[in-house]
Image (cartoon, rainbow, N blue to C red):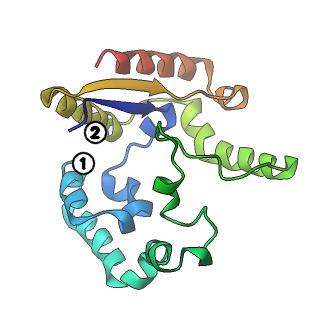
Amino acid sequence: KPRCVMFEYMAPAFVPDAPVEELMQPWMPKLSHADLRRLEAYSEDRSRLAAAWAGTRFNPWHTMRFTLMSHWQPGWLPWQLRQDFMWKMQDSFGWLPYPYESISSAKREQGTERMQKDFAGGLQDFHAGTWPERAFRDLLAECKAAGIRTAIYVMPESPVFRSWYSPASAARSAAHKIGRAHV
């Protein structure tokens, strides 16, 4: 049992207000049966959650190909796709290196456009979603009950990212961040 857990706070993670079977779809292949049981509390339709998870198990060779290749033939994959880089490249604080040594202006612009598409809408009218808020509170409560100290790290946001908030949303987001510090 850890003595302390640090949670990353990033406002956009609280925006999606959908049950876990929708939010976790991209991560279903990486979930164990125990993970599935843990997530049921945040599901609107447990049978849909189980079906989505089972669907990734139907063809495990394809679903788990990067994990399997990371174990058996890691040299066949660029390190960004390998699963083992997460524990082999971590520093002593648990941080991973940035996957690229340099980024061209065109690549940076593409990334900014993709992030704007993904996050700007939710930041323009920021409201914390019921599902992620409940999951976060439950996690903090579970740590407290187990005697595990917690810390919340507010992720820095670039000036471009901050410009996507409306003034009202920026105020709601700031209040939400402060509220997390007192949960």
Q: Is residue 175 left or right of residue 180?
A: right
- Residue 55: horizontal and vertical position, in percent? 33, 77
Residue type, label 2:
Ala
**Quarter-of-image position of residue 37:** bottom left
- In this rendering, the answer to whether 85 lies above or below 132 is below
Near-viewer residue (19 or 152): 152
Q: How many numbered discs sit on the rendered protein?
A: 2
Q: Position of residue 114 (x, y in %)?
A: 68, 50
Q: Which residue appears at 31% of the width and 34% of the height?
A: 136
Please tell me whether mark 1 sits on a helix, a strand or a loop.
Answer: helix
Residue positioned 53% across, 15% down in the render: 171
- The reply to whether residue 45 is visible in this rendering is no
Asked if residue 26 shows in the view, the reply is yes
Check residue 135 in the rendering and tell me which mark sits there, or answer none. 2
* Front-lying residue, 140 or 117: 140
Quick one: label 1, few (<14), some, or many (20+) residues within 10 Å?
A: some
Query: Which mark, residue 42?
Result: 1
In the image, which disc is placed on residue 31?
A: none
- Quarter holding the N terminus? top left
- Is residue 177 toward the left or the right of residue 135 in the image? right
Q: Is residue 171 above or below residue 7?
A: above
- Is residue 38 toward the left or the right of residue 12 in the image? left
The picture places residue 125, in percent across and down from the top left corner, at 54, 30
* Alpha-carbon span between mark 2 and mark 1: 7 Å
Report crowding for label 2: few under 14, some 14 to 19, many 20 or more residues within 10 A (C-alpha). Answer: some
Task: Please state if 55 lies on the left or on the right of 35 as rendered.
Answer: right
Q: Secondary structure at mark 2?
A: helix
Q: Are marks 2 and 1 in contact (CB under 8 Å)?
A: yes
Instruction: Looking at this view, name the residue that lies furthest to the left.
Output: 145
